[in-house]
Image (tube, rainbow, N blue to C red):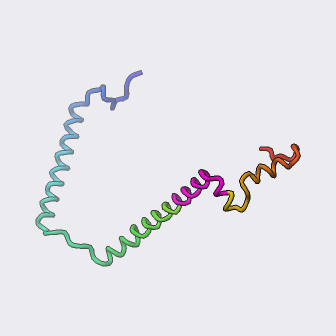
Amino acid sequence: MSPPADSPSDPPDRDELAAQLDDLEATLTDLRGELRDQGRRGPPQPPQLSELLRFTEQYTIPTLIAILEATIRSLELLRRTLRLADPERAAREEGLPLGADLTRLAARPDDSLPTR
């Protein structure tokens, strides 16, 4: 099976490489011209109030809401993890003595045990 045409083992076609270099040179020349034009315009202007409000409405507020939601989820996960790490505390919070579930299961006849 032969490698694909764009594989690194195949040398690039000289004409294709020359065309890509010409394209790159033209792009760099255009970008240099834009930079020179920006230098003539003076320093950048601060955003107008309407632009600032629009940016706040479209990006800042939704981003803050997403960050707060993620923080809440991570704190809830931490709380659950801490409860798993301390089963005595979880049993106390539920008002059941530790091992109450085991005692209740042990009191059942064998045929009434839950099955999975």
- 46 vs 63, left or right, is left
Residue 11 x, y percent position in the rendering: 26, 27
Q: In which quarter of the image is the N terminus?
A: top left
Residue 65 position (above or below residue 53): above
User: Residue placed farthest to the top in the image?
Assistant: 1
Q: 81 left or right of 54?
A: right
Residue at 13% from the left image edge and 63% from the top image edge: 37
* Percent coordinates x, y for residue 34 in the rendering: 17, 59
Image: magenta residue range: 73-90
Quadrant of residue 95 in the image? bottom right
Q: Nearer the viewer, residue 2 or 76?
A: 76
Q: Where is residue 19 in the image (x, y as percent from the top left)?
A: 21, 39
Of 4 and 65, nearer the camera is 65
Residue closer to the observer: 36 or 46: 46
Q: Nearer the viewer, residue 115 or 102?
A: 102
Is 79 a magenta residue? yes
Q: Is 107 displayed left or right of 13 in the figure?
A: right
Main secondary-structure element of the magenta-colored stretch: helix
Q: Which residue is drawn at 17% across and 49% down?
A: 28
Residue 113, image x, y percentages: 83, 46
Q: Does the magenta stretch include residue 101?
A: no
Callout count:
0
Above or below 103: residue 54: below
> Within the image, what quadrant is residue 18 found in?
top left
Q: Name the quadrant of the C terminus.
A: top right
Name above or below for residue 109 compared with residue 9.
below
Q: Quadrant of residue 89?
A: bottom right
Residue drawn at point x = 70 percent, y = 61 percent: 94
